[in-house]
Structures are given as structure tokens and as C-alpha cells.
Image (cartoon, coloured by chain):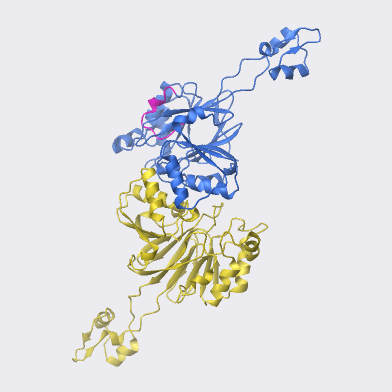
Chain colours: A yellow, B blue
Amino acid sequence: MELQFLGTSSGTPTKTRNVSGTALRSAGGWVLVDCGEGTQHRILRTNLSPHDLRAVFVTHLHGDHCYGLPGLLASAGLLNRTAPLAIVGPQPLERYVRGVMETTALQLPYPVRFIDVADAAAADLLDDLAVTVAPLSHRIASYAYGFTEKVTERRLDAAMLAAAGVPRGPLWGVLQGGNDVTLPDGSPVRSADVLQPPRRPRRIVIAGDNDMPELLAQAVQGADVLVHEATYTEAVLEKIGPGPQHSSALRVARFAREAAIPSLLLTHFSPRYQDERGPLTLADIEAEARAEYGGSLFLARDLARYALDKAGMLTELPPR
Amino acid sequence: MELQFLGTSSGTPTKTRNVSGTALRSAGGWVLVDCGEGTQHRILRTNLSPHDLRAVFVTHLHGDHCYGLPGLLASAGLLNRTAPLAIVGPQPLERYVRGVMETTALQLPYPVRFIDVADAAAADLLDDLAVTVAPLSHRIASYAYGFTEKVTERRLDAAMLAAAGVPRGPLWGVLQGGNDVTLPDGSPVRSADVLQPPRRPRRIVIAGDNDMPELLAQAVQGADVLVHEATYTEAVLEKIGPGPQHSSALRVARFAREAAIPSLLLTHFSPRYQDERGPLTLADIEAEARAEYGGSLFLARDLARYALDKAGMLTELPPR
């Protein structure tokens, strides 16, 4: 499983950071979580294509998370996409998109299916990923999406094979495929008896804007990675007050420590934090989070990719 | 007067060209013609600011000309803009923008005033520019906007001053300001008698998508510059057929020659034309236009600036 960030700025784009959009690649293809304005422009700088996007999950309907959706849909149409596209999100997502389509004469050569967040888990949208939804706390309805692998591959247990007397050869493949066999000597061997238990499925939770990370306590159980906004440092959050309903690095990091999440990926930084030099920098966010959280911590950058291996380890990939 | 292109691609953005958006600077500030997705991202790379944008003119409601408008409005709000903003365009522009604002909880700290194209000329929106509107031919209602200087500055005529016996000194300034004077010897001098006739006002016409350049015959009278789409070369247009209702370089250039327009600025190029290498390049568009048109020809590039001097000469400015 791989994450690629298409935008990591809060509210407005900066010269180096676009507004929110996160691509999640898995065995079955890619999905997009949020689609701020300019997401399709970022996609041009990746090897992702709107043509084979499987689904879009919108965390909430603030513009910096959804104003790129009409353009992405239009461009997929101009690329002659024909595959249906599922768009998941809170109300009034469908009214927003259909309103834009109607007033701007946008006709798509593929069907769009809108799925309310309440129905997202049951909709079984993705072959290889189960989806969960958790409500958050923000100025408007906001959600986190959890993506859990449906683990189907199984590995043979060499010791069990030896004990059962199965000779190395084609029978191993048959057993690994879940089928029982009969050995040349007539003794039966059941696949289930020579397979290792399935590995723990990987799970990534991607949260929308939220000022109460603790609402994710249940959602992050078994999660390898939490992607969460850290719009401000705590000092700036306290100066601004609770009105915007965002999280500080401190609050998210503290939650991640208490919830024992192995990897924390922070994003959605206020444009007041400069990348390098300035009165406020991303280093302030990072230092605040590191002081609270001893796990594997990353501050997302636009176009950066992060791979989650089968052991549950998150690492940043080198640029292509 | 100065034009700066914020997008020059048709339909979808490319790595080097955004979708449509054109800034027009004049003595009174700047206005924007069209606002495709990502226009605010381009603005970040200029010295323009959404904060002091005077008005937006939308040529037509296709997404590549207006999907950046909600994000630009939102960002101007986050920049604490308070000045009212006029948005001019065809129906259902207001319904489009208001629908997005309502469904995405966008509240702006400044008033937005929607003006239908039919009322744009009479609205007298800009202190220093008169606006004219011309209907075009496209799949949906599309318009060209003409911007003509309201010339107020006047120059003194040295020969007339000498003939009237006005000594060099403060009286010159008084006369230039439009006021009559009495000389020390008691003889009266009228300002109107010593001023040169006002210079010809500069005029720039910026057209939306259009497959019938000849519709602009009246609008370009007295124009120094026409900005017009040249989506295709003629061969590609003929291969695609008339359905998209765009112009070829040939058709626009031929019209510009017949209408004797001094400067022609082509834009809105199909992404199939590469900047440099490729089976089709912008050089194809340029060669086709040059073969028809002997005036001052430019193919717009993103972020390029073009200055129109008081003599009516258009030149490309060096990058900042």
C-alpha cells in the first residue's frame, strides 16, 4: 500500500503546497481522498491517471477539500474514461457536484455513483480494501476513512508440509491455492492444515479536518498509519482560538502516542508555516509532534510517496 | 495596459499550461477574464493579488474557464478582502457560484455582485476602462469583452502655447489641468486652445471560445489587440469536425488580417500541441497563423506578459 500526497496545505495553496488531496495505491489500483482545487494538476506530475481512478472519498465539503472535483471529473471525461466512478462523502456532496455539472454544461461519458458516508462501509466498493468511516469534529460534517486490506494470499508452512510428507512440487501450489490433495501413497492432506495463518491486514486511516483526534480511538485500532491534519502548533492554535476547529501537532501527536499508532503522517499545514526559513516553519510542527510521539513520524510534502510494507512499516520512497 | 496569461491550454491543463485565465492590468488595477481551475495557483507566481482584483469577466461557463472561481473567491476571503467584487458573465453564472457557495459552506467577508453580460457595458464597472460585450458562437453562450481606455490625460501643444504667449512656468500646469488662465498682460488663454487632441484610446478585445471569428468584426474596430482562441490547426479542426465549435489558427488569423487588427494574441491551445517536440507542436499553430496574418503575432504562454504602449504597440515583456 502506498500513499502519495497531492496537496498538504490548509485553506489556500502556496507555491510549494497544494490544498488537500491524497492518493492511496493498493493492489487493486488507486483511490483519492479529498480533491482540492488543482488536484488534477498535481496528478499530471505523478504516474496516476484520472482514467483508472477507482473511487473518490471526500472527508468534508470545505472548498480546499473538494473544489478540484468538477475539473477532475471533466478531465477524466476528456480522457474518454468509460468506467463508472464512485464518489463517497457527506451530504450535500451530490448536490454540489450535480449543481456544478448542470450549470456548466458538464456531461460525462461515464456514470458517476454518489455514495453517502453512512453507506460507504456496506457498499463494498473496492475489491481489495474494506472501508470504514468515523465521524470527526469540525465546523461542518467531517469524516475519517479507514482502508483495510482484504488479505487473500496465504503462505505455506514448511514444517507442516514436511510433517504431512508432501513432496516439493506442483502439489504445493495446489495446497497454497486452498485446495486439498491426495498424496501418491493415498493419504489426504487438507490445505488448511499446511497454510500459515493469514498475515495481519494493513490498515491506513485518513482523517479529514478535525479538532478532536480522540474521536478516532476506535477507528485507529489495528491501524498501521494515521494521516491527520496538524494545521497549527499548539501556541498558534491557542492564539487563534477554537473557532476554526483544527488540530495542533501536539494534540494529534499525543493522541497517536496514547493510541499506540505505529506511524503518524501529518498534513494540512497552515500556509503561515514556511518550508524552510521564516518566523514559523514546518520544523516547529515537527518538533512539537516529536516531543509527544515516539513512533514513526512524517510531515507530508506534496508529491511525496510513502510505502507501507506487509510488516506494517511506513517508509518514504525516493522521488521517481 | 498589460496582459498576463494565467492559462493557455484548452480543456485540460498540461504540465506547462493551465486552463484559461487572463489578467488585464491598467492604470486602475487589474481585472481577470476567465478563471479556470488553478488560476489562483498561477496568481501565486505573479505580483497580482486576489485582494485587489477589481472584477472578473467570464466569457462562458465551460469548466476550463470557470472552475477556479470558487477557490479564488474563497482565497480572497481568507486574505481578508473586504472590497466588493463584481463578477460578470452569462447565465447561469450566479446560480453556479451561489450553488457552490451554499453546498460548501463558503462565506465571504466581502460582497459579490453578479452582473449579466447584457448589463456589463452599462454598469460602468471600471473607472479607467469602458467595457463592451460581443456575442460569439460556441456550444454554449460565449462572449468577447472589449476594454477601452477612458483617456483623461491631455498634453500641451508647445506651438499653441508659444502663439498664445504663455511663459514656461506654473501656468502650463494649470492649462494642462483643463483650467483657463489670464496672463500677466491681462490676455485670457483657454485651456482647450493649447491642448493637443486627446490621444486615441487603447482597446483590447479578449474573446471566449468561438468558431466564428467574423462575429467580432464590429467589436475589433479600433482595437489594438485581439486575444482569441486558436485551439487547433485547420487540418486538425477538419479532422475533428465542427462539433467542438472552436477556431483554427488559420480562421482567426485570416479574420485578423481582413479586420486589420494590429496585434493578434493566440491562446487556448489543444493539449495535443506540444511546446517543443512532438508530432504536433505550437510551431504548427504559429506557422499557420503567420501565413495568413502579417501583423504583430504572439502565441501566449503561461505567465507571459504583454505590454500595450500608448502608441498601440504590443510587446512581450521579459520575465520578472
- Please tell me which residue is depicted at 59% across the width and 67% down the height of the picture: A249
Residue B52 in percent (x, y) is at 60, 40
* Figure check: A232 above or below B270: below
Quadrant in the picture for the N terminus of chain B: top right
| Left or right: B134 as drawn, with respect to A289 | left
Which of B257/A171 is in front?
B257
Quadrant in the picture for the C terminus of chain B: top right
- Please tell me which residue is depicted at 51% across the width and 75% down the height of the picture: A262
Which of B60/A78 is in front?
B60
Please tell me whether residue B313 belongs to the stretch shown in magenta. no
Residue A269 in percent (x, y) is at 57, 60
* Figure check: B111 above or below A61: above
| Left or right: A9 as drawn, with respect to A59 | right
Q: In which quarter of the image is residue A114?
A: bottom left
* Figure check: A77 above or below A211: above
* Figure check: B185 above or below A191: above
Residue A191 in percent (x, y) is at 27, 84
| Left or right: A259 as drawn, with respect to A127 | right
Q: Which residues fall within the magenta stretch?
A: B206-218
Residue A312 in percent (x, y) is at 45, 75
Can residue A72 be seen at all in this image of the molecule?
no
Can residue A26 be seen at all in this image of the molecule?
yes
